[in-house]
Amino acid sequence: MTLDPRLLDLLCCPAEENGAPCHGELTERADGLLCGKCARLYPVEDGIPVMLADHAKKVDA
């Protein structure tokens, strides 16, 4: 599934690391949206990105 590029341009990583916001750029993958800065993978359910840090998984870069 491909997200609208305009939506992807608006989204950024909502996670915090060491008390500072990540705000990393997200890249679309088959299994979700990957933050290039903190390596969290956010799921996409029924075409809707779930942008909650506690639903994201850390992945090996």
Image (tube, grey):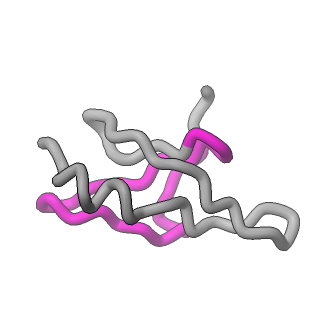
* Residue 28 against residue 21 in the figure, above or below: above
Q: Residue at x 67, y 46 (%)?
A: 38
* Residue 50 against residue 58 in the figure, above or below: below
Percent position of residue 34, x then y: 46, 43
Q: Residue at x 47, y 71 (%)?
A: 52
Percent position of residue 50, x then y: 35, 66
Instruction: Quadrant for residue 15, please give it.
Output: bottom right
Nearest the camera: 37 or 57?
37
Q: Residue furthest top?
A: 61
Percent position of residue 2, x then y: 15, 43
Q: Residue at x 54, y 46 (%)?
A: 35
**Residue 20 belongs to magenta span:** no
Q: Which residues are magenta?
A: 36-58
Percent position of residue 29, x then y: 32, 35
Instruction: Quadrant for residue 32, please give it.
Output: top left
Nearest the camera: 57 or 17?
17
